[in-house]
Image: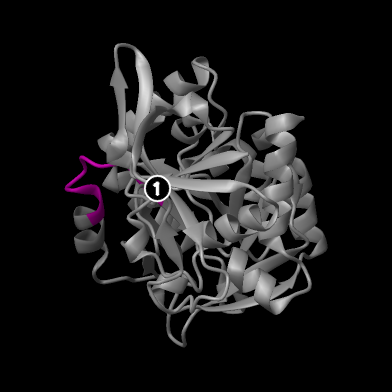
Amino acid sequence: MRVLFVIDPIVGLKAYKDTSVAMMFALVARGHQVSVCHQGDLYIDEGRVMALTQAITLLPQADLHGQSWWEASGASAEVPLSSFAAVLMRKDPPFDMEYVYATHLLEFAQAQGAKVFNEGAAIRNHPEKLSITEFKQFTTPTLVTRSMARIKAFHDKHLDVIVKPLDGMGGTGIFRMRAGEINRNAILEALTHDGTRTIMAQRYIPEIVNGDKRILLIGGEAVPYCLARIPLAGETRGNLAAGGRGVAQPLSENDWAIARAVAPVLAARGLLLVGLDVIGNYMTEINVTSPTCFVEITEQTDFDVGARFAQALEVAVHG
C-alpha cells in the first residue's frame, strides 16, 4: 500500500533515532511505498483535500547518522489525500493554529475516503496534558487553572508541586516549586502571563528519579516494554530533549493496569498510536501528536516496535 507521512522537513530528521523514520523502514520492509509532505503542503481545492507529495526510496545500507538515507523517487505530485491507503500525521508540535487547521483538513479528507492516523479530530480533541484528567484514578492531584491564587493554595496544600504550560514539549517551561519557594510569584506570573494563561499544577512525584516512563499503545494494545527517561542529576525533567537517559524496561503491573484501562478507550476514538507518560504509579501525559521512543525500545529489547506498528496499520487499513 502507499503511505503518506505528513512530517517535518525530512532533511532535518535525525534518522538514527527518529520514530517516523523507523516507521518508514518497517513499512518498506513489508513491501509498502512511502511518500512525504509537509503540513504546509496540505490544501483544499474546490472542496477536495489535496497535498503536494514526494515519493521516496529508502536506502537500506545507508548511514542513518548522515543525510543520504533516502532519495526522491520521481517528481513531486499534487494528489488527493484519499489516493493513499493511509495518511500518517507525524508533524511535531508546536500545536499552534496552523496545526489545528491541519487537523481540520485531515478530518475533511477522512470524509472524502482518506484513512488518517491519528485521526484529525482525535488529535485535536485530546490535548496532551489535559487528557489525563479523564482518567483521574491514575493521576496525582492535579489542578488546571489560570488563577494564581488557586495555584498558590494548591502549593500550600501539597508543598512540593510541578507547574507547567499546557502547550509545552520536551520539558520546556516546567518548574518545581518546593515548600517556601521564594520565586513562586515570579514563576506563576511568567507561566500564566499574569493570570491570563491556563496552566497545570501537579503534586510532585518523587519517583521521577527512577524515570519518566513512555508507554506505547499501538492499535489498542500496549508494547510490553517502556522507555524510562531518567533525569540528569539535579534535574526534575526526564525528557530526552532535556538530557534524560533512556532505559528500556518491561512494563510493571501498574503500567499494565493503566495501559489496559486507557488503550481501548483511546483506540476507539481513532488514535492508532499513543504515548503514555507515567511517573511512579501516575500517568502525567497522553501523547497523541507524534509519539516517539520506537528506536530506543527496539535497540534495547527483543521487541521490534516499528514492525508492530506496521502490522497494526495494515489491520487498521484493511481490517
Which residues fall within the magenta stretch? 191-200
In the depicted structure, whether residue 276 falls above or below residue 49: below
Name the residue carrying label 1: 74
Q: Is residue 84 left or right of residue 167?
A: right
Q: Position of residue 98 (x, y in %)?
A: 27, 36
Give, as a three-letter code, the residue at label 1: Gly
Q: Position of residue 164 (x, y in %)?
A: 36, 56
User: Camera-side residue: 92 or 27?
Assistant: 27
Quadrant location of residue 317? Answer: top right
User: Camera-side residue: 292 or 87?
Assistant: 87
Q: Is residue 243 left or right of residue 119?
A: left
User: Camera-side residue: 32 or 104?
Assistant: 32
Main SS class of the magenta portion in the image: loop
Q: Residue at x 56, y 66 (%)?
A: 205
In the depicted structure, whether residue 170 falls above or below residue 116: below
> Can residue 136 be seen?
yes
> Can residue 237 be seen?
no
Badge 1: few (under 14), some or many (20 or more) residues near its Cα, within 10 Å? few
User: Camera-side residue: 173 or 90?
Assistant: 90
